[in-house]
Image: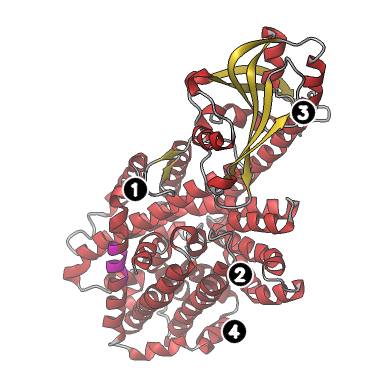
Amino acid sequence: MALMLGSIGVVYGDIGTSPLYAFKESIAHVGADGTPATQAEIFGVVSLMFWALMIIVTMKYALLLMRLNNRGEGGTLSLAALAQRLAGRRTAFVLVAGMLGAAMFYGDAMLTPAISVLSAVEGLTVIPALNGHIEPFILPIALCILAGLFLFQSHGTHRVGALFGPICLIWFATLAGLGLYHLAEAPEVLQALNPAHALGFLFTHHVMSFVVLGSVFLTVTGAEALYADMGHFGRKPIASAWIWIVLPCLTLNYLGQAAMVLRHPENAASPFFLMAPEAFRPALVVLATMATIIASQAVISGAYSLTRQAIQLGLLPRLHIKQTSESEFGQIYMPQVNYMLLAGVVFLTVAFGSSSAMAHAYGMSVIGAMLTSSILAVAVIPRAWKWKPVYAVLLMAPFIAIELVFLSANALKIFSGGIVPLLIAGGLMFLMIAWVRGAKKVADYSRTYLPLKDLFDSLTRRPPALVKGTAIFLTSEPDFAPAALLHNLKHNHVLHERVVILSVRTAPTPEVPNAARVEIKDLETAPGLPRTQIMMLNFGFMETPNVSKALALARKQGLAFDIMDTTFFVSRTALIAKRAKGLPRVLSHLYIATARNATDAFQFFQIPSSRVVELGNQAPI
């Protein structure tokens, strides 16, 4: 029960605030010509919304996709890592699919806070005492709330996180209560649960049905959170919370909005807030604002977690990660990501100006992420469940077909705002491609260095002077002599008594147990040369690498050293754009600019800065 309550506050904030705008935008298309929607049209729209929740959220995510987890972790990147682990190699298809899903998520992370908070603040207009006076202040109020939310991130969310579950539980209870209140006026709306009304609407409205489907899809935005946050709460608490609490409350509210519009067509302009009696509307606006802040917080935290995964999987450059809670592993803060999201959210809020205008942009990034997870599932199911590939295709084909229909419906909104999340995703996709290809070029260049064994064989003829202490050389290619080691020999003509070649690797699993954290092997060297060891530190893609703590574990395997007598050597690589046989010019310059702004290796790997020596070299890409 505790995990269910926690998941309600974190997982369901986004999808739980959809009633603020989903039905309003969907029914607005039907009555766009000024004619009130008929009973059949209202039934058809709310039936489409209910069955979208049933098919996409309940069947695909809660009952199917959440069973495909990477040792308890979910999400597009986790699914891509699982496919990579099961295949035993990193395929281009899985890599591109993972990058696409991650890029699409960032578009959602910028749009969700903007549309959610703006929708809640717009509820002030239905308060009679404020109507006609508050409109010029809606946008500034929303911007102040959003700015405060992002500026608070550096303090961590653990202080207010305990309130998320109870507040969201009150929110869902309110949704259900308002729905039941209006269902009593028009109980015939319950007929809309019959899928025949949804199919009838689609077959009788033709082109209009596609336009409506683009808004109906707003009902399921946030469904990816069920899968992405599985590692924090577990599959059963999240699925149980959906089936027993969230789904019934959302269904009752959508039916209640339909019942109210059926009896009072004039309320279609703002059906959610007009569901409440006039005396309770101010309290409902406050509660809705709190719910949208929680929904925004969940998306922001998800963006931090996804970015950390992308960094560990080599899709993005190193960025500063700050742990904000000593007890909660998932509580992190990433300043670069935070301010990038803040800039994007403020720009989108000002550019669109209203939740109705922003609804045209909302959806494209979400359906892209959903479609990516479905396609990845086709690749994972045969190996994970030992099925024939054709059975995996048959299982996922209905979901892919429905998502393609929603993709087509949302594509109609491209020129009225839907292109915005595509541009965001495209820019991030381009950045990730530049980073992956640039990192590969740098790794290929490092392989042109002298193999480590050959280096020490050559030193037997003219051994260098030895100094006391331990030298640890960081490198991504442990079989080759690190550039810092070569420079140290070239300019200083010395080596330490103990040399450790250290490489940090990311496993295709969420976490790595301490027993498998450290791998050490001795390199055979001639007498008179330092004792040399190759050490691998393994971290999961959900973990933040901490070399200092990992080295404490290494003592159990025979690597005892005094940190005050240890020097870490890090290569500082100056990248040079090389036209011939290098990356395309745009990619090379983008990689170089990104690498210059990346967090230093010793900071990212949490190495004491007072023990670090940086030695430079050049690498053409």
Query: Disc 2 vs disc 3: which is toward the camera?
Result: 3
Query: Up-down: is 318 above or below 127?
Result: above
Q: Earlier in the sequence, mark 2 or mark 3?
A: 2
Query: Disc 2 vs disc 4: which is toward the camera?
Result: 2
The location of residue 147, given as percent across then percent down, is: 34, 43
Q: Earlier in the sequence, mark 4 or mark 1?
A: 1
Q: Earlier in the sequence, mark 1 or mark 3?
A: 1
Closer-to-camera residue (320/110): 320
| Magenta part of the chain | 166-172
Tell me how far mark 2 sits from mark 1, CA to CA.
34 Å
Tell me how far mark 4 sits from mark 3, CA to CA.
60 Å
Tell me how far mark 2 sits from mark 4, CA to CA.
18 Å
Please name the residue that numbered disc 2 is placed on.
403
Closer-to-camera residue (554/617): 554
Q: Earlier in the sequence, mark 2 or mark 4?
A: 4
Q: Which mark is residue 203?
A: 4
Tell me how far mark 4 sits from mark 1, CA to CA.
47 Å
Tell me how far mark 2 sits from mark 3, CA to CA.
43 Å
Q: Decide: few, some or many residues near mark 1? Use Cα within 10 Å; few <14, some 14-19, many ≥20.
A: some
Query: Up-down: is 233 above or below 455?
Result: below
The location of residue 586, given as percent across then percent down, is: 70, 33
Query: Does the magenta run of residues contain 249?
Result: no
Please name the residue that numbered disc 3 is placed on.
445
As helix, strand or loop, the secondary structure at mark 2 comes to: helix
Q: Earlier in the sequence, mark 4 or mark 3?
A: 4
Q: Main secondary structure of the magenta part?
A: helix
The location of residue 239, given as percent across then percent down, is: 46, 71
Query: Disc 4 vs disc 1: which is toward the camera?
Result: 1
Please name the residue that numbered disc 1 is placed on.
157
Q: Decide: few, some or many residues near mark 3? Use Cα within 10 Å; few <14, some 14-19, many ≥20.
A: some
Q: Earlier in the sequence, mark 2 or mark 1?
A: 1
